[in-house]
Amino acid sequence: MLNDPRSHGLWERTAPPPPLTDKLVEDKVADVAIVGAGYTGLSTALHLAERGVEVAVLEAVEIGYGAAGRNAGLVNAGLWVMPSSLKEVLGPDYGERLLNLLTYSPRTVFEIIEKHHIQCELIKAGTIHCAASAAGVANIKERARQWQERGAPVRILDAEEVRSLTGTSAYAAGLLDLRAGTIQPLAYARGLGQAAISAGARVFTRSPVKEFGRDHGTWRLVTPDGSVRAKWVVLASDAYTAHIVPELRNEQVAVPIFQIATVPLSNNVRRSILPEGHGIWDTRTVPTGFRMDAAGRLIINSVGALRNTGRAIHRAWARRRFRTFYPQLGDVALEHEWYGWIGTTGDHLPRLHAPGENMIALAGFNGRGIAPGTVLGREIARHVAGELQLEDMFLPVSTPRNAPLRHAREAYYEIGAQVAHMPPL
Ligand SMILES: Cc1cc2nc3c(=O)[nH]c(=O)nc-3n(C[C@H](O)[C@H](O)[C@H](O)COP(=O)(O)OP(=O)(O)OC[C@H]3O[C@@H](n4cnc5c(N)ncnc54)[C@H](O)[C@@H]3O)c2cc1C
């Protein structure tokens, strides 16, 4: 995308082509205008179009240009924080509603993929949260306890079980979550886009919304070559928010995450690493994650931006990590490297805003947006369609607040990741 191999890397190379879309030209009218063609915007569009609502999605670049086309593709349940945090932060009503929606959220993603025949390398084997220390073991045990209390199919694996499912003996224990799975994330975004279009939504790409305002009781969103008038506006631009409503971006601290993929592995080596197709990540402060793609490339991920000094430091770290975790890889060639930004909030929960009449915004997925973006996008569609009142939604409506010391914290994460990934002295 935009001739930048470090933006969408492997995913752009192996995703099926995007649906044909046009740039917005001239002045159009719709019931609902949606800004952003990631999971949130496209899920909202799909579920509105299925209800017969006229939808126009306006995307600045291409479908999946934001985090949807760059991420690690682990379709996990819940959010990044412990299940109990939702009720602690949001109170019993909102906490329980959000938790109810997200406890089996991967199922919604899988159903959409299957219903619309989306070719996105779906594997429903589950994911494993691996414990890298005694504190990590305590953390995953508590998570397991909380999910099991809700009847979720999760269980603790001992070191030997983790070794047999991951191929590495680096971990003392793991939390196997059978609700979860892995996908090719850009392929899912493109398939979701196609599903929305087939249901009747119009998706305009290369159409950044540069300004908007009220005009005769409707919203008017203006792009460089056209405009859309709509009764409702949904802002689904998350951490990649550009040009408009800077408050949505400014309330999030952007943390970079990179991924590096090997060439396809030989069948012998491939069988010894993540043999059942689990995606894994660990409990370290600067976590390490691994997954395989359909062609047998092993992909590693961690915190960091592949730019400036970060590029060489993180690449060398990835080589060392591959070698220590999976010595059978030898001096394997690396084929793709790319990185993107997750938007984090102070309490690690997303935010729902209503910045104007008939305008709603959802942002701040904190690195857990595939299933939440899909499910909460559907809930936004229900609200816009009049089926769900604002006060019955999954989050209280809040006013965006600038993240304190945002620039300093963003620099801290980028530089801190380099320090963490330096070779030991
Ligand atoms: C490297 C990485 C790894 C991740 N790993 C995982 C993972 O394994 N599992 C998981 O669940 N989540 C993961 N995430 C998080 C997940 O990708 C995001 O939470 C999710 O993509 C958010 O979806 P979204 O639709 O809200 O926003 P995005 O996918 O970011 O889409 C927003 C879109 O809005 C567009 N836009 C912005 N401004 C405008 C404008 N003015 N006009 C028109 N369009 C505009 C952008 O171009 C963009 O396409 C990861 C993220 C990254 C970056």
Image (cartoon, rainbow, N blue to C red):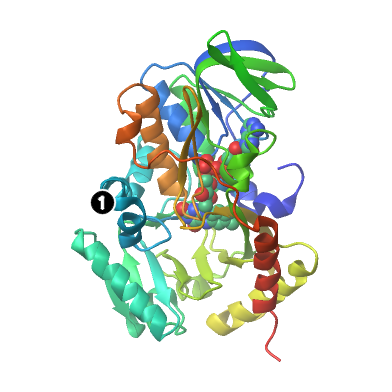
Tag 1: residue type?
Pro
> Which quadrant does the N terminus fall into?
top right
Q: Which residue is depicted at the point 75% across and 41% down?
A: 2
Q: Quadrant of the C terminus?
A: bottom right
**Point 69% across, 77% down: residue:** 419
Pointer 1 local density, CA inside 10 Å: few below 14, some 14–19, many at least 20: few
Q: Residue at x 45, y 68 (%)?
A: 280
Query: Is 373 on the left or on the right of 35, as rendered?
Result: left
Residue, disc 1: 92
Res. 240 in view? yes
Question: From where the camera sits, is residue 73 visible?
Answer: no
Q: Give coordinates of residue 355: x percent, y percent.
A: 52, 31
Does residue 420 sit above or below 356 in this rendering? below
Residue 338 located left or right of residue 344: right
Whether label 1 lies within 8 Å of ligand 1 gets the answer: no
- Looking at this view, name the residue that lies furthest to the top: 216
Question: Could you say whether the residue bearing mark 1 is in a helix, strand or loop?
Answer: helix
Residue 56, image x and y in percent? 54, 21
Q: How many marks?
A: 1
At which x and y percent is residue 269? Answer: 52, 75
Q: Which residue is nearer to you in this view: 121 or 109?
A: 109
Q: Establish if 168 lies above or below 40.
A: below
Residue at the extreme right of the image, as rendered:
308
Residue 388 lies in quadrant: top left
Q: Nearer the viewer, residue 386 or 167?
A: 386
**Residue 3: horizontal and vertical position, in percent?**
77, 45
Q: Residue at x 41, y 47 (%)?
A: 371
